[in-house]
Amino acid sequence: MDIVVANFNNETVSVLLRKDRGALNITNTFAAATGSLLRSFFVVDVNNDTLLDIIVCNYGTDNINVLIGLGKGTFGSKITYPVGLETHPGSITVDDLNKDGQMDIIVANYETKNLVTFLGSGNENFENLGTYSARFDFAPSIIAVGNFNNDGRLEILICGYYIIKFAVSFSSLTMLSC
């Protein structure tokens, strides 16, 4: 198993590939923008080529980067998507939100206490679907998506410090406390 590391202090993402006998070698390091303050990342195939891609959440530069996997631990140039001024994205998750077979991105913004969604097209491009304000009474620090109540639809799990809430519907973002 290989490892991806977001390096907060030197603003890079490193890919460590496992070699024979379990040793890890750094094969690639990607520089994010100066002042990016990397917070989280997600590894997933976003363009349906069976190669893993990396999506990085940049707290300091208010954007996300998509690094398209080329195979053997190498990646293409980063594609940058803004999430809003002074939003400070802190967490990211990926799933097929609209059931079109393409991976979509959800970003939780720490400063503005909202979510931004990007719909995937399957060809390395994402369209900013919009910002959802759920009137959080806390700054979201971690998000996840899944079918938590077995109704066949995805829900968003939103966590702040000592707080967990569910967004039940993507259209209205009804909040439930846990």
Image (spheres, helix red, strand yellow):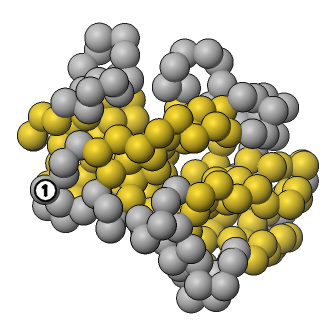
- What residue did someone put label 1 on? 137
Kind of residue indicated by mark 1: Asp
Q: Residue 155, relative to residue 62: is it above or below? A: above
The image shows residue 94, relative to residue 80, as above or below, that is: above
Q: Can residue 50 be seen at all in this image of the molecule?
A: no
Image height of 4 relative to 12, above or below:
above
Instruction: Identify the image quadrant of the C terminus.
Output: top left
Q: Nearer the viewer, residue 174 or 76?
A: 174
Furthest-left residue in view?
Answer: 177
Residue 110, image x and y in percent?
A: 34, 64
The residue shown at (49%, 60%) is 84
- Of residue 50 and residue 46, the one placed in the foreground of this image is 46
In the picture, residue 102 is in which quadrant?
top right
Q: Residue at x 29, y 45 (%)?
A: 133
Residue at the image position 52 percent from the left and 56 percent from the top: 83
Residue 87 percent across, percent down from the top left: 41, 65
Q: Estimate the x, y position of residue 10 in percent, counting from the top left.
A: 64, 88
Image coordinates of residue 49 in percent, x first then y, are 84, 32
Label 1 Cα neighbours within 10 Å, binned few <14 / some 14-19 / many ≥20: few
Q: Is residue 129 left or right of residue 133?
A: right
Badge 1 marks a residue whose secondary structure is: loop
**Is 89 or 159 nearer to us in this picture?**
89
Camera-side residue: 85 or 94? 85
* Residue 42 shows in the view: yes
Q: Residue furthest front?
A: 85
In this rendering, is residue 30 above or below 3? below
Task: Say whether residue 49 is left or right of residue 12.
Answer: right
Q: Which of the 4 image quadrants contains residue 14?
A: bottom right
* Residue at x 35% of width, y 41% of height: 132
Q: Outermost residue, top direction? A: 151
